[in-house]
Amino acid sequence: MDRSGPTPYLLLPGTARVALARWQQVFGGELRIASYSDFARTDGPPQAVAHGELVGPVRLAAADAGPGDEPFSASGVLFALLGTAGPDVLRRWFTDLSTDGTVVDALQERPWGDWDGTVRDAFGVTWLIGFERSALDD
């Protein structure tokens, strides 16, 4: 198992499969999903996601919240993708996430010359996406 940093693990309200598929569509990567029935869990619907993971340029995990679990909700936290890819890729990610989400702050050049913006996707995850001005020269 190769990890370079924390991996967000979201407990979603029955939307983990759809969310993971959407994030794979946006970010690419390999999607691994195990259902409740795959793990012999009987505390929820057999097709519910017991564990799902997206492995690629963006790595995250999600599952459907089980009984007694509080589903994901966030305020005051941003998932930063600053400089994690080239400007063209970051712009595409921002656009793709905003298609079924909400632009909180448009991706734009800032007074200091770098670019960033914030978008909340359809699953309530707020992404801070941006790049340094110098990346435009690469």
Image (cartoon, rainbow, N blue to C red):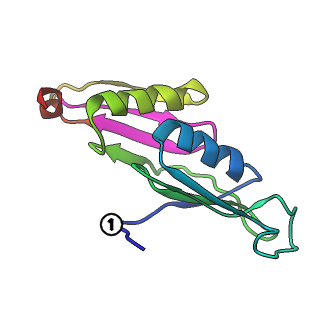
The x, y position of residue 21, in whole percent, is 63, 44
The quarter of the displayed image where residue 25 is located: top right
Q: Residue at x 27, y 30 (%)?
A: 87
Q: Residue drawn at (35%, 33%), measured in percent from left and top?
A: 90
Q: How many marks?
A: 1
Task: Look at mark 1 in the image and give the residue it sits on.
Answer: 4
The magenta segment is 114-130
Which amino acid lies under the numbered mark 1 shown in the image of this protein?
Answer: Ser
Q: Nearer the viewer, residue 97 or 37?
A: 37
Task: Give the residue drawn at x 42%, y 74%.
Answer: 1
**Residue 56 x, y percent position in the rendering:** 43, 52
Task: Say what secondary structure mark 1 lies in.
Answer: loop
Q: Is residue 114 above or below residue 72?
A: above
In the displayed structure, 46 sits above or below 30; it is below
**Overall secondary structure of the magenta stretch?**
strand
Front in this rendered view, residue 102 or 89: 89
Q: What residue sits 16% from the left and 30% below the top?
A: 133
Q: In the rendered image, which quarter is residue 135 located in? A: top left
In the image, is residue 43 part of the stretch drawn in magenta? no
Q: Quick check: is 123 in the magenta stretch?
A: yes
Quarter of the picture containing the C terminus is top left
Image quadrant assignment for residue 131: top left
The 10 Å Cα crowd at callout 1, few under 14, some 14 to 19, many 20 or more, is few
Q: Position of residue 60 (x, y in %)?
A: 50, 57
How far across and how far down the image is residue 3, in percent? Answer: 37, 69
Seen in the picture, residue 59 relative to 87 is either above or below; the reply is below
Is 82 left or right of 54, judged from the image as shown?
Answer: left
